[in-house]
Amino acid sequence: MVTIKSASDIEKMREAGKIAANALQVVGQKIRPGMTTKDIDKIIHREITAHGAKPSFLGYGGFPASACVSVNNEVIHGIPSDHRRVAEGDIVSVDVGAFYKGFHSDTCYTFAVGEISPEAKALLQTTEESLYEAIKVANIGARLGDISHTVEAYCRERGYGIVKQYCGHGIGRNLHEEPEVPNHGKPGHGMRLVQGMTICIEPMINAVGDEIIQLPDGWTVITKSGSLSAHFEHEVLITADGPVILTLP
């Protein structure tokens, strides 16, 4: 069931969103070659808890860390490690959530470590742009398929693969709520957006091909092609005045 949020709910969600976004911002300031993915996770944990919130991902379904940290060909759900160091030229997706005053937030950004290749830059730019193009169409009366199609069309036109097995979602008192928000679909199809809905839009885009593989750790998902993958996510409130991003620092 889709939950419609009250003004009070929204204010708490805005606070939770700001906490998660601020934590990502700190990672962006500190990420550098030689850091471990566990170092990144520690930054996220410290920044979220310092504001009186709890990391939404820690223990969720048994996940062992406060952030999903996915490097290069890892699409999502990378488990932070003391043994995995990021290097110059890597791209690193950091997916985080904060639980605050009874509500969750969820946001992701893919960072460049030092100077990255032109191919990696183009992938990051297209994926992030597709997110903002999709947010633009998240208006009252639009359908979920309009969001999905916007991401798919924008990225397909530029030759990229779309991850179909994972998608965006509703959010609120639960980290994952209805409805699902895929990154592929037909315009004019699916549930209509109404005022007070809160959804996460999160393009997961591969440089080559749609296919993915889950690793034996039960969490980490990689591209089957071995190509790079990028992931950007914002939490969005549907309002009479247009979409409002709740995960801004």
Image (spheres, grey):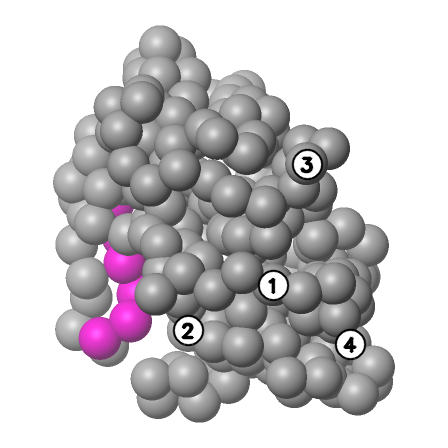
- Residue at the disc numbered 1: 5
Q: Mark 3 — residue?
A: 240
Task: Name the amino acid, label 1.
Answer: Lys
Q: Residues within 10 Å of mark 3 (few under 14, many from 20)?
A: few
Sequence-wise, which precedes: disc 2 or disc 1?
Answer: 1
Quarter occupied by residue 102: bottom right
Relative horizontal placement of residue 188, taking residue 79 as reference (left or right): left
CB contact under 8 Å: marks 3 and 2: no
Badge 1 crowding class, 10 Å Cα cut-off, few under 14, some 14 to 19, many 20 or more, is some
> In whole angstroms, how far apart are the C-alphas of marks 3 and 1?
14 Å
Q: Is residue 19 left or right of residue 64?
A: right
Q: Secondary structure at mark 2?
A: loop
Residues marked 4 and 2 touching at CB (< 8 Å): no
Q: Nearer the viewer, mark 4 or mark 2?
A: 4
Horizontal and vertical percent position of residue 120: 50, 29
Kindly identify which residue carries mark 2.
Answer: 79
**Residue at numbered disc 4:** 47
Q: Earlier in the sequence, mark 3 or mark 1?
A: 1
Q: Which residues are magenta?
A: 218-223
